[in-house]
Image: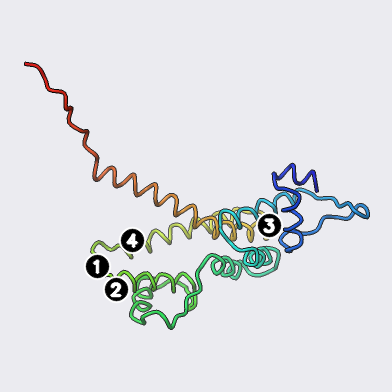
Amino acid sequence: MAELSRASGIPVATIKFYLRERLLPAGERTGPNQASYGEEHLRRLRLIRGLLEIGGLSVATARGVIDAVDSELPLTQSFGVAQRAVSDKIDPGDIDPDALAGIDRLVEGWLVSGDNPGRLAAAQVLQTFESLGQKDERSWFSRYAAAALLVAEADLDQVEAQASREDMAETVVIGTVLGDALFSGLRRAAQEHVSTLRYPVLPEPDPTPTRE
């Protein structure tokens, strides 16, 4: 375990905590107080840190996500587990039916279940947007939907590039949990880029008087 700690940069006490919480599988026993840990443990530690530190998941939620990786669930169900892990729980009864209908029109033709957390969250955003008196002047929602499809295609292309079912399931989780953080960061960078292009800051005039 000391060697695993050095290789991962994670304190031994933290690794023991992950073992107790069933986030990390036990090592192979080599003696009464010794166990052997391999590359799979190092890889799992990186996944755990990504889920907890970058994804912001609780230990219990991360355990459920990791269980989905280790299971034989179809990949579509693994996506569902990962989506619910990073999504707020929303009661459909709290959403205006008109907002839900608006999102359904927006994603018409998509194969989306009624309780998909993204559908509910998008309807909640639409409801709030309209309650603030905002108007979708330039197809903001439909352009976001088009961008979301491009991102989903990229997600699945990355999944399908993996060699094994376990690797694919792990990429589903990583892509869903960490992909949200990645896209959010890139969106902010892009906003600065586009706003700078559209509204350039003019240089301040030189206050030094010129001599004739």
**Tag of residue 72:** none
Q: Give, as a three-letter code, the residue at label 1.
A: Lys
Q: Give, as a three-letter code, the residue at label 4.
A: Arg
Ranked by sequence position, the earlier of labels 4 and 1 is 1
State the residue lying farthest toward the top: 212
Q: Residue at x 24, y 45 (%)?
A: 198
Label 2 sits on residue: 131
Q: CA distance from mark 2 to mark 3?
A: 47 Å
State the residue lying farthest toward the front: 208
Ranked by sequence position, the earlier of labels 3 and 4 is 4
Label 4 sits on residue: 143
**Tag of residue 135:** 1
**Tag of residue 164:** 3
Q: CA distance from mark 2 to mark 4?
A: 21 Å
Q: Give, as a three-letter code, the residue at label 3.
A: Ser
Q: CA distance from mark 1 to mark 3?
A: 46 Å
Element type at mark 2: helix
